[in-house]
């Protein structure tokens, strides 16, 4: 599983968080780890989905989403 963080613009409330969490949760091969106003963190199986497809699912909910590099120390 690979880690992915998303910076998300346009979220402002708990409804937004729930909407993004629901959208991410429907994706095959994606494990939602955290969703908060302005960000999400997931683990995903690159054999089953792509990072750009994950961001697109958030965009489909009406929010601007961009992957943020995950730094592993």
Image (cartoon, rainbow, N blue to C red):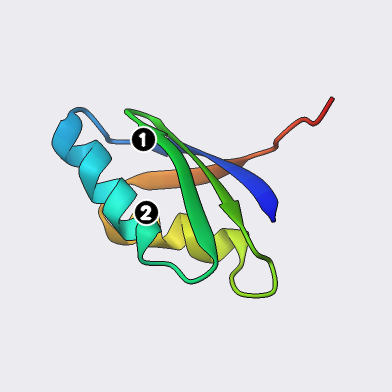
Front-lying residue, 39 or 48: 48
Circle 1 sits on which residue? 9
Q: Position of residue 22 (x, y in %)?
A: 28, 55
Query: In the picture shown, does residue 62 fall above or below 10?
Result: below
Would residue 72 be found to the left or right of residue 37 on screen?
Answer: right
Q: Quadrant of residue 24?
A: bottom left
Q: Quadrant of residue 11?
A: top left
Q: Given this view, does label 1 or label 2 mark the residue nearer the observer?
A: 2
Quadrant in the picture for the C terminus: top right
Circle 2 sits on which residue? 58
Would residue 7 be found to the left or right of residue 47 on screen?
Answer: left
Q: Residue at x 61, y 75 (%)?
A: 48
What's the distance in space between the residues labelled 1 and 2, CA to CA?
10 Å
Query: In the picture shown, does residue 10 fall above or below 23?
Result: above
**Mark 2: few, some, or many residues within 10 Å (few <14, many ≥20)?**
many
Asked if disc 1 and disc 2 are in contact, CB closer than 8 Å, the reply is no
């Amino acid at each position: 599983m690979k880690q992915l963080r998303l910076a998300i613009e346009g979220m402002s409330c708990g409804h937004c968080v729930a909407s993004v969490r629901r959208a991410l949760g429907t994706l095959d091969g994606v494990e939602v780890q955290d969703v908060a106003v302005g960000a999400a963190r997931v683990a995903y199986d690159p054999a089953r989905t792509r990072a750009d497809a994950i961001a697109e699912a958030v965009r489909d909910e009406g929010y601007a989403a961009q992957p943020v590099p995950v730094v592993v120390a």
